[in-house]
Image (tube, rainbow, N blue to C red):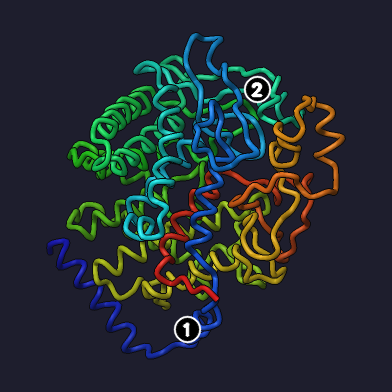
């Protein structure tokens, strides 16, 4: 049986199941939920603000067209101690350290959004802004890969930085350099960097072919480095250490390399290593399996029948999240929010929403009626409706009636756990704010942040849908680049449903 026949067979099975089962109570519940969520959120506005956020996270020499005006130049000597240029890139969250591993994940997610929803993002007038945000990250990753077996993975001492509260423009903590080599490998970081560059190469293919080819070439080099010198990444403890192992990053990277290059060796790689693929219930900076599975499921429906395990596994991921599923693993709060874990839970919500959005699109494009979750089935439109409920919750449809994106809506967090946002700008307060001064005067202050970091999505509410707007509560009030990057994809998928009141 060919893969096309398999696809048609799956569609027929779903159609028959739906006909035999009739309209179940669960289906009715989802339909009613969809009607309830027919809200007036402006996804175009949210998308633009989510992308704008990245300008407030920039490190290095800021460009003349910088839109976030409270930020200034920072970390202009990064890399100097090793005679390398490590200027630019992003601060990953509310701190002043540059971590290449989560930065690479961020870039890959932004690229994925640009690849899947190029038309929608372009129609919203945000494609150039998105490409600019991408290039700020890819340029840095290119600089960090200084030789075939070297990748700088961190700039800045995390311990001293996290004991200080100062603007990036004032920063005087050590800009310590960390790197992986053939003698001290870190396959997760190298493979994720490879995924970022190959994904971005697709975004720039038609607008800057030379840059696109450079990205793809460096991506291949990073993948070879990650695969040849296998070893789990141990970052500057306790910041971004691997818990899931490196196999997920190698599959994620190989999937993107195949998508970008169409070189069959990367297809063969994911086929021969499909034993690494497991059913999971989260997609995050540490565990990339669900993302790789969604990418490869698209290839399966495109005719690559050897990839059926990835299709099955990503559907298991979806079944683990959809309310009413007979194999539910991640429950929702009373207010309807997916709840994976307490610390920065919205990162899991946005990343899961992106995977669900992409696979919903894959099902629609492939004319597949639904997926089976044991005795329950979900259509592509039901999956997308659930994504909408998560995005709407973030934008204000929640028990707190507040948006968890700064600057979006009438009520949103005012005490973002973010150094630069919480201390007056260097343009209004020119004297230096020292490490300890920042702690006493700003971190533990109860006043709103003087600089509004528009577009920043915070860690979110607790399991009871409650949010304390306190700067010191970093697990709920701190933004991250990868949280925003995943939101960009989820919001872009909903642009055709924007309704402005």
Q: Secondary structure at mark 1?
A: helix
Residue farthest along the left direction in this orientation: 1
Residue 435: % across, % down = 79, 26
Residue 24, by quadrant, is bottom left
Q: Name the image quarter holding residue 174.
A: top right
Quadrant for the N terminus in the image: bottom left
Q: Position of residue 460 (x, y in %)?
A: 66, 56
> Where 327 sits versus 74, above or below?
below
The residue positioned 74% from the left and 53% from the top of the image is: 414
Identify whether 436 is placed above or below 423. above
- What is the spatial separation of the Cα atoms under label 1 and label 2, in whole angstroms? 50 Å
Residue at position x 48%, y 66% in the image = 387
Whether 283 is drawn above or below 134: the answer is below
Where is 456 relative to 159, above or below? below
Residue positioned 50% across, 20% down in the render = 86
Q: Earlier in the sequence, mark 1 or mark 2?
A: 1
Residue at which label 2 appears: 157
Determine whether, in the image, residue 53 is placed left or right of residue 474. left
| Whether label 1 touches label 2, CB < 8 Å | no
Instruction: Note whether residue 283 is visible.
Output: yes
Q: Which corner quadrant holds the C terminus?
A: bottom right
Q: Position of residue 89 (x, y in %)?
A: 50, 31
Image quarter of residue 409: bottom right
Q: Determine whether, in the image, residue 490 is placed left or right of residue 483.
A: left
In the drawing, what numbered circle is on residue 31?
1
Q: How dense is the environment of label 2, judged by Cα within 10 Å: few (below 14), some, or many (20 and up)?
A: some
Q: Where residue 44 appears, x then y in whole percent?
A: 47, 62
Q: Secondary structure at mark 2?
A: loop
**What is the crowding at mark 1: few (fewer than 14 residues within 10 Å), some, or many (at least 20)?**
some
Left or right of residue 171: residue 490: left
């Amino acid at each position: 049986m060919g893969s096309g026949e398999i696809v048609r067979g799956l569609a027929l099975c779903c159609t028959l199941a739906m006909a035999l089962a009739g309209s179940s109570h669960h289906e009715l519940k989802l339909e009613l939920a969809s009607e309830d969520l027919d809200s007036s959120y402006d996804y175009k506005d949210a998308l633009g603000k989510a992308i704008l956020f990245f300008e407030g996270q920039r490190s290095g020499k800021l460009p003349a067209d910088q839109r976030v005006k409270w930020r200034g130049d920072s970390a202009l000597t990064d890399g100097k101690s090793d005679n390398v240029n490590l200027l630019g890139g992003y601060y990953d969250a509310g701190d002043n350290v540059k971590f290449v591993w989560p930065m690479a994940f961020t870039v890959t997610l932004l690229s994925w959004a640009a690849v899947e929803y190029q038309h929608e993002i372009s129609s919203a007038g945000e494609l150039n802004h998105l490409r600019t945000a991408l290039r700020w990250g890819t340029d840095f990753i290119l600089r960090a890969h200084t030789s075939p077996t070297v990748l700088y993975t961190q700039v800045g001492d995390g311990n001293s930085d996290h004991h200080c509260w100062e603007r990036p423009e004032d920063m005087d903590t050590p800009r310590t350099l960390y790197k992986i080599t053939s003698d001290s490998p870190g396959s997760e970081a190298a493979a994720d960097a490879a995924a970022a560059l190959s994904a971005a190469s697709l975004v720039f293919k038609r607008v800057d072919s030379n840059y696109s080819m450079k990205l793809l070439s460096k991506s291949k080099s990073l993948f070879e480095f990650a695969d040849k010198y296998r070893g789990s990444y141990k970052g500057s403890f306790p910041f971004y250490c691997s818990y899931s192992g490196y196999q997920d990053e190698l599959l994620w990277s190989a999937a993107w390399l195949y998508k970008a290059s169409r070189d069959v060796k990367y297809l063969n790689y994911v086929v021969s290593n499909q034993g690494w693929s497991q059913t999971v219930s989260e997609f995050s900076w540490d565990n990339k399996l669900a993302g790789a599975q969604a990418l490869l499921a698209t290839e399966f429906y495109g005719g690559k029948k050897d990839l059926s395990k990835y299709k099955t596994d990503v559907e298991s991921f979806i079944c683990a999240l959809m309310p009413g599923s007979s194999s539910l693993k991640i429950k929702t709060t009373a207010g309807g929010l997916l709840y994976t874990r307490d610390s920065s839970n919205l990162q899991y919500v946005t990343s899961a929403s992106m995977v669900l959005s992409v696979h919903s699109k894959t099902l629609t494009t492939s004319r597949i009626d639904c997926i089976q979750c044991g005795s329950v089935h979900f259509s592509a439109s039901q999956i997308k409706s659930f994504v909408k409920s998560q995005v709407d919750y973030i934008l204000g449809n929640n028990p707190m009636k507040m948006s968890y994106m700064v600057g979006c809506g009438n009520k949103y967090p005012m005490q973002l756990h973010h150094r630069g946002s919480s201390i007056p700008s260097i343009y209004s307060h020119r004297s230096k704010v020292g490490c300890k001064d920042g702690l006493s005067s700003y971190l533990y202050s109860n006043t709103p942040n003087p600089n509004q970091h528009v577009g920043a999505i915070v860690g979110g509410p607790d399991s009871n849908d409650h949010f304390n707007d306190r700067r010191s509560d970093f697990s709920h009030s701190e933004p991250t680049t990868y949280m925003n990057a995943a939101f960009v994809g989820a919001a872009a998928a909903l642009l055709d449903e924007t309704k402005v009141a």
